[in-house]
Image (tube, rainbow, N blue to C red):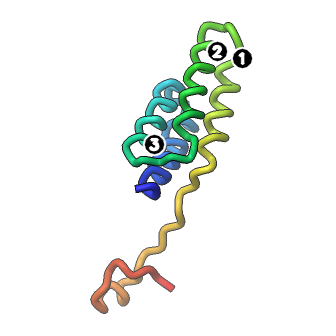
């Protein structure tokens, strides 16, 4: 399940945080993914802390949203997308289409 959690966090970074999606929503999703996949490497705590910082930045009490976005991107950068290699057509027809090329 940890691999699934790491993959979801990488997708979250690539598709939502970098594209400008709401920071609170992204940090909350990171917590949801960590909880659902039982990923226990500190991401839950870091994302919860980020939600607090985002609230302070939104009310212009401390920091900026740009700083919060950069910090969230840095936090999620610890979860890179794994490389994907696909089987060639000849490998797929040899009986195992899930075999990786190479």
In the picture of the structure, the residue carrying the numbered disc 3 is: 34
Mark drawn on residue 63: 1
Circle 3 — which element? helix
Q: Looking at the rendering, which quadrant does residue 66 occupy?
A: top right
Q: CA distance from mark 1 to mark 3?
A: 26 Å
**Disc 1 crowd, CA 10 A, few/some/many (<14, 14-19, 20+):** some
Question: Looking at the image, is 36 positioned above or below residue 24?
Answer: below
Relative image position of residue 47 (x, y in whole percent):
55, 32
Q: Residue at the spot x=36%, y=84% of the render?
A: 89
Q: Is residue 20 left or right of residue 71?
A: left
Q: Between marks 1 and 2, how big is the CA–CA gap?
A: 5 Å
Please state which of residues 7 and 91 is positioned toward the viewer in this rendering.
7
Q: Residues within 10 Å of mark 2 (few under 14, many from 20)?
A: some
Residue drawn 41% across and 83% down? 88
First in sequence: mark 3 vs mark 2: 3
Task: Classify mark 1: helix, strand or loop.
Answer: loop
Residue for point 43% across, 75% down: 86
Q: Residues within 10 Å of mark 3 (few under 14, many from 20)?
A: many
Residue nearest the observer in this picture, 93 or 31: 31
The answer to whether the residue labelled 1 contacts the one labelled 2, judged by CB atoms less than 8 Å apart, is yes
User: Could you tell me how many numbered marks the image carries?
Assistant: 3
> What residue did someone put label 2 on?
57
Q: Residue 40: image x %, image y %?
A: 51, 46
Q: Nearer the viewer, residue 5 or 68?
A: 5
């Amino acid at each position: 399940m940890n691999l699934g959690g790491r993959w979801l966090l990488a997708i979250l970074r690539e598709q939502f945080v970098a594209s400008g999606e709401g920071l609170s929503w992204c940090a909350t999703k990171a917590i949801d993914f960590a909880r659902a996949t039982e990923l226990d490497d500190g991401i839950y705590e870091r994302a919860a802390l980020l939600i607090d910082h985002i609230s302070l930045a939104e009310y212009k009490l401390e920091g900026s949203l740009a700083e919060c976005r950069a910090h969230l991107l840095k936090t999620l950068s610890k979860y890179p997308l794994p490389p994907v290699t696909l089987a060639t057509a000849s490998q797929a027809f040899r009986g195992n289409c899930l075999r990786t090329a190479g």
